[in-house]
Amino acid sequence: MHNSLGDASVLRVLDAEHDPPDWVTTIRILRPPAAPEGGFGETRPATPAMLLEAFVADSKAINPDLVFSNQRTEETLAGLPAARATAEYLHSSKRIARYDWYFIQTGPNRFLLVECLADRDRWKGEIFDSLLASLVVEDEFELADQALSRQELGAAVFRRVDEQALREVVARMPEEIWYRMHAFDAEGRDVEFGYAGITAIETGRESMGTARPVARVGDDTGMLVRIRMRQIPQAPKRPFIDVDHRAWLSWDREEEMWSVRLTARQANAEQTVSESITGFRPRPTASEPRRRLEILQQSRNTLERQIARLELPMNLELFLSEAERLVLPTLLDVLDVPEGTFGIYAWNEDRESITRRLEAWEPDPDGGAMLESRAYEDGRIATQEIGADGIVSVRVAPTDTSAGGVRWTRMTPAAIRDLYDRKGIRVED
């Protein structure tokens, strides 16, 4: 419990000159040993105040340089009994570390210890208070039940996805749909990030490798979703970035393939830098019945290649293909899914693994809807607003580079060009 009281943890914060953290928070689960029958624990069960008093006394004995400035034994946190202590410690660098400890009782003989540590001179008092005020403590079994019910709801949704539903998604998108990508900077100015177009067509898997995918019919076709994106430079001498994201899914959902190719090019230059990642989920066979996703990452410039194989749920109702993910709001609208939050497994590009997504779907009486997506349980929320035609009108993707995230606003190509002309933005073909 007291390993964090010495110089080592203080150094993490006080000596982090390069991109120093504002604060560090650690949460531990405490289960004190039960007292013997008829002993101390029976007449005086453990409380946050008792743990805090013992902790403070022990801390002073271990580190006499700790100076306690505040100690409150009757508090509540997240609606639960709690006790709190604050101490400061003079580090050898002459900086002062501030500690806050909170003991929270979550059940009989069950506690959480929340430790907050920061450089006192960098620390802003409201940070810890707002963090602790937002803390939600839930029973682990209740959380497990919630996760299971959301997963069952997700399975019920995707049990209804069939060839007819996927074809209806394609029918909703007879032509390429374009979006302006923009965001607001720290001063609230509207900044252009680029533009993107999305299409959905019926075609064969061969369109994954052609320069221009062509729609066709046949016994071996499926749904191909393609997003073409151009990111414009945010500073002089920065490159244009083109992204070609394609995902193909067989009508029976048993087979898929997707790729993301990124190409960076300086303005008026011929040389490019290209990287790509490809995913392939082969159709199960008698000799290979298990479902798996094979990932290939490669760079055209360095010739570096990495291959990974990931096991997938055997029940396909629990898995969201990449093509379905790219058009999920429209697919949910086609299925007429009622309001609710469901869980579904999918490939996550940030974590490069299979994660369980959380999708909160909320139709409105006017025929539109809102979808709030988390790529994993504690991920940031991406929102998509759907119009009455079942097509996304606004998408907001969370990002660290702009306030409020990057917005995708549906516009015609002519309207985007006119906006860029008025702003003096030149975009190469």
Image (tube, helix red, strand yellow):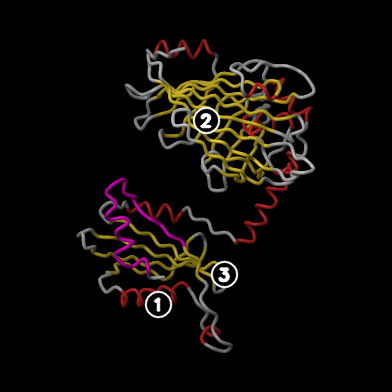
Mark 3: few/some/many CA within 10 Å (<14, 14-19, 20+):
few
Instruction: State the image coordinates of residue 210 (x, y, percent, origin top left).
Output: 61, 19
For the record, the magenta segment spans: 3-27
Task: Examine the rendered structure and indicate whether residue 45 appears above or below residue 23.
Answer: below
Residue 6 location in percent, x, y? 31, 67
Residue drawn at x 53%, y 85% is: 43
Label 2 residue SS: strand
Cα distance in 3D space between marks 3 and 2: 50 Å
Give the Cα separation between the discs numbered 1 and 2: 56 Å
- Give the residue at mark 2: 276
27 over 275 or under it: above or below: below
Left or right? Give the position of 52 relative to 388: left
> Which label lies toward us, 3 or 2?
2
Residue 330 is left or right of residue 408, and the answer is: right
Residue hosting label 1: 54
Residue 410: give its label. Answer: none
Task: State how far apart marks 1 and 3 are (Cα).
Answer: 19 Å
Circle 1 SS class: helix
User: Residue 413 magenta-drawn?
Assistant: no
Which residue lies under the disc numbered 3?
107
Q: Is residue 241 left or right of residue 346?
A: left
Q: Amino acid at mark 2?
A: Ser
- Left or right relative to 7: residue 39: right
The nearer-to-camera label among 1 and 2 is 2
Total tally of numbered discs in the picture: 3
